[in-house]
Image (spheres, rainbow, N blue to C red):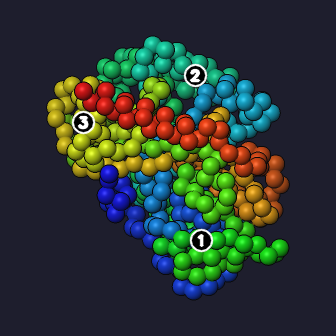
Amino acid sequence: MPDETTISVWDTTSAEPDLGKGLNGDTACDVAIIGGGYTGLSTALHAAEKGMNCHVLEAQRIGHGGSGRNVGLVNAGLWMPPQDVQAILGEAKSVPLIKALGDMPEYVFSLIEKHQIQCEPHRSGTIHAAHSPSGFRNLQRRAEGWKRLGVHVDLLDASDVAEKTGSNAFFGGLLDRRAGTIDPMGYTRGLGRAALSAGARISVGTKAQNLSHDGTHWTVSTNQGIVTAKYVVLATNAYADDLWPGLRQSYTSIPFFQLSTQPLGAPANHILKGNQGLWDTAPIMFSLRRDNQGRLIIGSMGAIHGDTTGLSQRWAAKTLHRLFPDLGPVEFESAWHGQIAMTSDHIFRIHRPAENLFAPVGYNGRGIITGTLFGQALSDLMTGAPEDTLPVPISDIQPARFRTVKTNLFQTAFTMNQFWKSL
């Protein structure tokens, strides 16, 4: 297992410093935000800018959960093709949602520019690479779906993908120029810094242990003191615990692991030379990207087995050799995994299980844009915006069907995938 004292490679390389301090006694605020990741810090930033007194309560460190372990792909849209979203939600609800998520990379990069967040932003797009001929047909369908909505994405043939990625392993690809890459921990800390500047408070090492409501205000009991608030936002996504009954059981948690090489220098300059991030169409997908120091960061669904040595390292080395046979052996310096909250239909949820209590969950691998969007939307709602302006309607918490069975099957499949592809 990876060393939990280091969250990810981004934890040690980010130019944005760690932030936050412990809660010092009891306090009161307008909105208590539980979780110091994208959602919590975006909520704090946007609500504080609207004049609300915000307090972020993080049990560990800022970015300790999925935000600091993210791949850093600022993708547009949901996990699914636009046609599938429309089939599930209907045109009236799906088109505004798809547009909002399609516009979110631009908004994320505008926040980075506005607050001068040091997070290695590259607005050069992401490449969805076809692992097979059927994968390319899927990308053709995606491109057609975006075209119907008036959005242009570049459908690439195999030679185009080879030129942009440095690999001949793909059957084509889809380049979405709205998207890009960032240092995900840098973005998280930068949102926190901006929230502090706007007047929010951030308490780390402060675990929420109990919630109660007296008919007017919420009381959040923590290991460091009590926080009283009008509103509470449970901004934990895939890292929900039992603080609110049933929330953790409402989604299926899927691990995603990554390993980073040492800086590779000139021998790897031809790999993703335009600084696009990459993810493929395989059922057990993998991701690949660079950082500004020349590291390659590769990952896939599943947990880390063996840290920088062992099964996951063998999978990573074998996969890089398959993609780039001329690269030669590489050494890995960091390994980690995080959790993704998946819903059955791959569409996220906003729950309101009690008065003035909000719990957005189920980001389905789109944490950067979704967390940022939800923070903005919830701050609007708490300052008077109509409920129908939320990205999705508020829904009741429902248990995910066959959650335990799915979790066990996924874990087995992911581990076997690492094993077979490391041979």
Of callouts 2 and 3, the N-terminal one: 2
Give the residue pinned by disc 2: 143
Residue type at mark 1 is: Gln
- Residue 290 location in percent, x, y? 33, 42
Residue type at mark 2 is: Ala
Give the residue pinned by disc 3: 314
- Residue 157 location in percent, x, y? 43, 16
Give the residue pinned by disc 1: 209
Q: Residue at x 72, y 72 (%)?
A: 212
Residue placed most toward the observer, 243 or 233: 243
**Numbered label tally:** 3
- Horizontal relation, residue 271 to residue 247: left or right: left
Q: Mark 1 and mark 2: span between their CA atoms?
A: 46 Å
Residue type at mark 3 is: Arg
Q: Residue at x 33, y 20 (%)?
A: 169
Q: Residue at x 45, y 13 (%)?
A: 133
Q: Look at the numbered discs 2 and 3 and tell me whether their residues touch, using CB distance below 8 Å.
A: no
Q: Secondary structure at mark 1?
A: strand
- Residue 354 location in percent, x, y? 78, 61
